[in-house]
Amino acid sequence: MRADPPEKSDTTPTSAIDGAQSRIMSTIRSICVYCGSSPGTNPEFAEIARAFGQILAENGITLVYGGGARGLMGALARAVHDNGGSVVGIIPDFLKSRERMFAGAHEIVVTRDMHERKRLMFERADAFVALPGGVGTLEELVEQLTWSQLGRHSKPILIANINGFWDPLLELLDHMKRSGFISSELAIDYKVVDRVQDILPAIEAAAAVAEAAPASAVIERM
C-alpha cells in the first residue's frame, strides 16, 4: 500500500546527501534504479540523479540499471562511478548504440532482448527505485508493482516523487483503489518519498518489514 510522503522540502540536491550516507545498509547490497534516458526539462532531475548516485557509492550499494550513458541514466551512473561505487549496466543489444553504453561501468551485461534485460535486473537487485523517466521507466516500475501485488517477490519498491513528477501515477493508483480494481487482498506495496535523502532510509525500513514477514515466493523467470 502507498506510504504517505514526507512534507515537501526545498532541500537542494547538493545537501540532500547529508545524513543519508552514515552507514552501509545491512540488508540492501544493490538497488535497481529505473530512470529516463533523457535529461527531462527540469535540471533538478539530473541533480537528484547525481545526488542519489553519490549516496549509493558512499553507502557501498551497487547500482543496477539499464546501462546507458545518456540522460538521467548517465548522470546517475557517472555519479556512482566518480564517487568510487560499483555500477552494473544491463542493456539489450539493439540499444547499445541508441542509448550509448556507459564505458565506466564495472560490469556490462548485453542481453538478447528487453525480456532478458528486465529479468536480470530483477535478479541482480535487492530493491527498486523509480526516478523521473518516460514510458520505459513507467513500464518497468509497474511491472515490479504487479509482481509484488501477485506475491512473486517482497523486494522494496520506492517511487522518488521529485517535484511531484509521479503525482499523476499516484492519483491513478488511488483512483483504481477507489474504483475497486485494487483490493485489500491484492494491495500494492510501495513507498513514496520526495527527497533524495529519504530514499535509502525508506528502503531499509521496508526491507526490515519484509524480513520479519513470512518468506514469499521469488520469481525465477518472467
Image: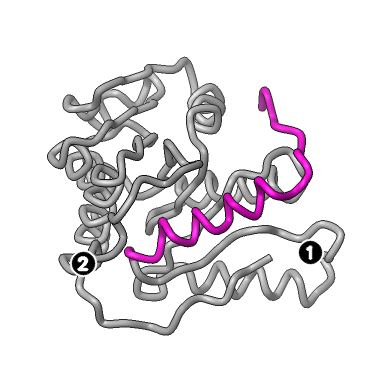
Q: Nearer the viewer, mark 1 or mark 2?
A: 2
Determine the secondary structure under disc 1: loop
Whether 7 is drawn above or below 94: the answer is: below
Q: Main secondary structure of the magenta part?
A: helix
Specify whether residue 38 is in view. no
Q: Reading the chain from its start, which is encountered first: label 1 or label 2?
A: 2
**Quadrant of the image for the N terminus?**
bottom right
Which residues lie in the magenta part?
196-222
Whether 2 is drawn above or below 153: the answer is: below
Whether 186 is drawn above or below 6: the answer is: above
Which picture quadrant has residue 147? top right
Whether 86 is drawn above or below 21: the answer is: above
**Quadrant of the image for the C terminus?**
top right
User: Going 84% across and 70% down the picture, which residue do you hit?
Assistant: 180
The circle on residue 182 is 1
User: Going 25% across and 42% down the picture, which residue do you hit?
Assistant: 57
- Give the residue type that dot 1 points to: Ile
Question: Is residue 35 on the magenta stretch?
Answer: no
Left or right: where 19 falls relative to 27 = left
Foreground: 81 or 76? Answer: 81
How many marks the image carries: the answer is 2
Whole-percent x and y of residue 216? 76, 39
Foreground: 200 or 118? Answer: 200
Specify whether residue 130 is in view. yes
Left or right: where 208 falls relative to 187 = left
Question: Is residue 201 on the magenta stretch?
Answer: yes
What whole-number distance in Å separates the C-alpha atoms at marks 1 and 2?
34 Å
Whole-percent x and y of residue 188? 70, 59
Whole-percent x and y of residue 165? 41, 69
Whole-percent x and y of residue 79? 18, 45
The circle on residue 13 is 2
- Give the residue type that dot 2 points to: Pro
